[in-house]
Image (spheres, rainbow, N blue to C red):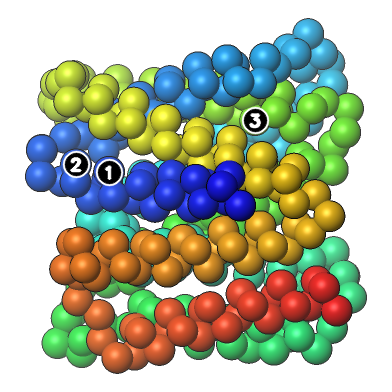
């Protein structure tokens, strides 16, 4: 259970760091770039990936899209936290689990039981309620968490395809994907510095390093939690998604004083119910 708790804390902390970074006039692009530098280093030190077979056996058709999507959606995650807060962004990220579920049903023709169907019927209104804002607001800020949801959902589908590819260890694939993401972000950082005229401040490295450490910690402890609960993976699945929504909501509301409407609270409640139904559908 300790690994699961640590994974939840790391996941929420990433959002908290982006929230705090707003007060220091930092470059989100440089933070995400340095994040992958540190994540790549810790991935190599922790997993010692075997790169000898990558050139011939690697599914590059999956690696490259993930490597591009990861930093792009990470930037949208940072923008979403800035625009709508931690509560709604974390909820949108966790509700992204419905994207691979829909793909399994509509594309891969997986059999669905009644609980999964009910979970989908509950999950979509939950998302709409979470993203609902006061009518006097005219800005389309909901676009940011919506992109986060769709992006992480697509990434989840692609990572599941990598998990099915057994010729290379999953951790080696993770290292390669991080490497591609870093290459993409090097280009983005160069553009940020030269074209956007944003200097390379040490504070960007500090925040990027912290985000990278907690981002990797989230993945490391999540994998360890699955290993510890090998016979009951639904415990990890439910605990992670519900834990991030609950802890993220508490941090957003009580620490950063984010304002939610009654409809937003109703959406969070429905999101938790939807996740419980998904877990039950895997058990029964």
Looking at the picture, how far across and down is residue 207, in whole percent? 26, 31
Where is residue 265 shown, x and y percent of the image?
Answer: 35, 84
Q: Residue placed at 80% from the left, 89% from the top?
A: 114
State the residue lying farthest toward the top: 52
Where's residue 231, x and y in %?
84, 55
- Numbered mark located on residue 40 in the image: none
**Can you tell which quarter of the image residue 192 is in?**
top left
Image side of residue 172 versus residue 246, left or right: right
Q: Foreground: 257 or 182?
A: 257
- Cβ–Cβ under 8 Å for marks 3 and 2: no
Residue 24 vertical position relative to residue 175 in the rendered view, above or below: below
For the point 21% across and 86% down, the residue is 134
Q: Which residue is mark 3?
A: 174
For marks 3 and 2 on the same chain, the one whose residue lies earlier in the sequence: 2
Height in image: 14 above or below 203?
Answer: below
Label 3 crowding class (10 Å Cα cut-off): few <14, some 14-19, many 20+? many
Q: Along the line of sight, which residue is nearer the eye, 25 or 261?
A: 261
Residue 207 shows in this picture = yes
Work out whether residue 10 or residue 73 is closer to the camera in this orientation and state it. Answer: 10
Q: Are marks 1 and 2 in contact (CB under 8 Å)?
A: yes
User: Could you tell me how many numbered marks the image carries?
Assistant: 3
Instruction: State the separation of the CA atoms marked 1 and 2.
Output: 6 Å
Q: Mark 3 and 1 residues: CB-CB less than 8 Å, in contact?
A: no
Label 2's element?
A: helix
Residue on which the image places disc 1 = 17
Q: Is residue 156 left or right of residue 61?
A: left
Which of the 4 image quadrants contains residue 59? Answer: top right
Q: Which mark is residue 21?
A: 2
Q: CA distance from mark 3 to mark 1?
A: 23 Å
């Amino acid at each position: 259970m300790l690994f699961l708790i640590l994974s939840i804390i790391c996941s929420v902390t990433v959002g908290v760091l982006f929230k705090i970074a707003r007060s220091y006039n930092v470059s989100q692009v440089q933070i995400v770039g340095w994040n992958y530098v540190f994540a790549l280093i810790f991935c190599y030190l922790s997993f010692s990936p075997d790169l000898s077979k990558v050139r011939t056996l690697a599914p590059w058709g999956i690696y490259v899209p993930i490597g591009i999507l990861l930093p792009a959606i990470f930037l949208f995650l940072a923008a979403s936290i800035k625009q709508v807060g931690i509560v709604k962004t974390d909820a949108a990220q966790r509700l992204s689990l419905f994207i691979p579920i829909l793909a399994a049903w509509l594309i891969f023709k997986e059999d669905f039981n009644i609980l999964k169907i009910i979970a989908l019927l509950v999950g979509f209104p939950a998302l709409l309620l979470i993203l609902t804002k006061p009518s006097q607001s005219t800005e389309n800020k909901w676009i940011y968490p919506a992109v986060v949801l769709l992006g992480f959902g697509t990434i989840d589908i692609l990572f599941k395809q990598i998990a099915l590819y057994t010729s290379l260890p999953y951790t080696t694939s993770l290292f390669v994907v991080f490497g591609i993401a870093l290459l993409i972000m090097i280009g983005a950082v160069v553009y940020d510095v030269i074209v956007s005229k944003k200097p390379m401040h040490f504070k960007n490295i500090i925040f990027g390093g912290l985000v990278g450490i907690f981002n990797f910690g989230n993945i490391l402890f999540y994998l360890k939690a699955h290993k510890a609960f090998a016979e009951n993976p639904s415990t990890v699945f439910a605990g992670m998604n519900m834990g991030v929504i609950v802890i993220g909501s508490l941090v957003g509301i009580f620490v950063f004083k984010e304002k939610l409407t009654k409809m937003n609270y109703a959406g969070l409640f429905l999101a938790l119910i939807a996740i419980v139904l998904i877990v039950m559908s895997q058990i029964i």
